[in-house]
Image (cartoon, helix red, strand yellow):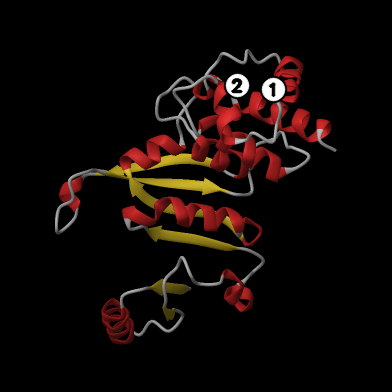
């Protein structure tokens, strides 16, 4: 086991507890997980790692992005999130909390809410509840795209201005795609350009990504 902790005081505290308990299979790393290189784990891969963590609420999104970038090394992750974040990651189309990160996570991993953790479980007590979420990177979304970079752009552009129609959001965020190309892609996928991003299902985003890739190849 490799434990990464930014606070040196907690590293020292844990080191003392591990020593007292006679536990010798834990490697402590005093580092910021967002700046730490996952490739440092090469010696521990067998063949992939499992990630477990109680994330500080303010790094949830950047850590998820880092995890996705290193998904080839990870079989699954069990993480504790602020309840709102966990609900957003597992939201369905048509829900106001359904967004870009929902789709980016869904594409790469199957997510399951395991259980809730009430605020009263912590000291000091936070203002919100938490949720433990399992992400299985060995069960990605079954339909794939020809270019993941285009899929990422499509999803982020669609939700960049979520109160606007899909076409207008693309116009503002990704002007490199002309109206002609966008409308043709939407027509091929049976997507009304007046819809909003939160109403589209994953398969529709994947179709748009593949159509735009083909038109720009």
Of the two numbered discs 2 and 1 in the rendering, the one whose residue sits closer to the viewer: 1
Check disc 2 and report the residue beneath it: 167
Residue furthest toward the right? 217
Compared to residue 1, the image places residue 50 above or below, namely above
Q: What element carries label 2?
A: helix
Which residue is depicted at the point 34% across and 42% down? 115
User: Residue tagged by mark 1?
Assistant: 179
Looking at the rendering, which quadrant does residue 188 occupy?
A: top right
Within 10 Å of disc 2 (Cα), the crowding (few <14, some 14-19, many 20+) is many
In the displayed structure image, the side of residue 154 where residue 57 appears, left or right? left
Q: Identify which residue is drawn at 53% across, 19% down.
A: 165
Tell whether label 1 touches label 2 (CB within 8 Å).
yes
- Residue 142 image offset from top left, x and y in percent: 69, 35
Query: In the rendered structure, which disc, 2 or 1, sits on the residue that comes first in sequence?
Result: 2
> In the rendered view, would you say 153 is above or below 14?
above
- Measured from the top left, where is residue 54 in percent x and y? 35, 58
Nearer the observer, 101 or 115 = 101
Q: Position of residue 60 (x, y in %)?
A: 40, 52
Circle 1: element type = helix
Q: How crowded is mark 1: few (under 14 residues within 10 Å), some or many (20 or more)?
A: some
- Across and down, in percent, residue 162 comes to 47, 27
- When the figure is inspected, residue 36 is found, relative to residue 52, above or below; the finding is below
Q: Residue 126 carries which label?
A: none
């Amino acid at each position: 086991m490799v434990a990464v902790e930014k606070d040196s005081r907690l590293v020292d505290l844990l080191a003392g507890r591990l020593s007292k308990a006679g536990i010798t299979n834990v490697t402590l790393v005093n580092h910021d997980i967002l700046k730490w290189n996952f490739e440092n784990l090469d010696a521990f891969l067998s063949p992939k790692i499992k990630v477990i963590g109680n994330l500080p609420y303010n790094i949830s999104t950047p850590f998820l992005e880092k995890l996705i970038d290193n998904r080839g090394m990870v079989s699954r992750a069990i993480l504790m999130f602020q309840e709102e974040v966990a609900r957003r990651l597992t939201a369905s189309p048509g829900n106001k909390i359904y967004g870009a990160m929902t789709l980016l996570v869904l594409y790469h991993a199957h997510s399951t809410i395991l259980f809730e953790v009430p605020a009263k479980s912590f000291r000091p007590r936070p203002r919100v509840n938490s949720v433990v979420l399992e992400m299985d990177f060995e069960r990605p979304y079954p339909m794939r795209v020809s270019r993941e970079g285009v899929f990422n752009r499509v999803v982020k552009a669609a939700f960049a201005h979520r109160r606007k129609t899909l076409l207008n959001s693309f116009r503002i965020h990704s002007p490199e795609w002309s109206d002609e190309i966008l409308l043709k892609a939407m027509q091929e996928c049976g997507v009304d350009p007046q819809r909003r991003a939160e109403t589209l299902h994953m398969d529709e985003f994947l179709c748009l990504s593949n159509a735009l890739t083909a038109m720009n190849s």
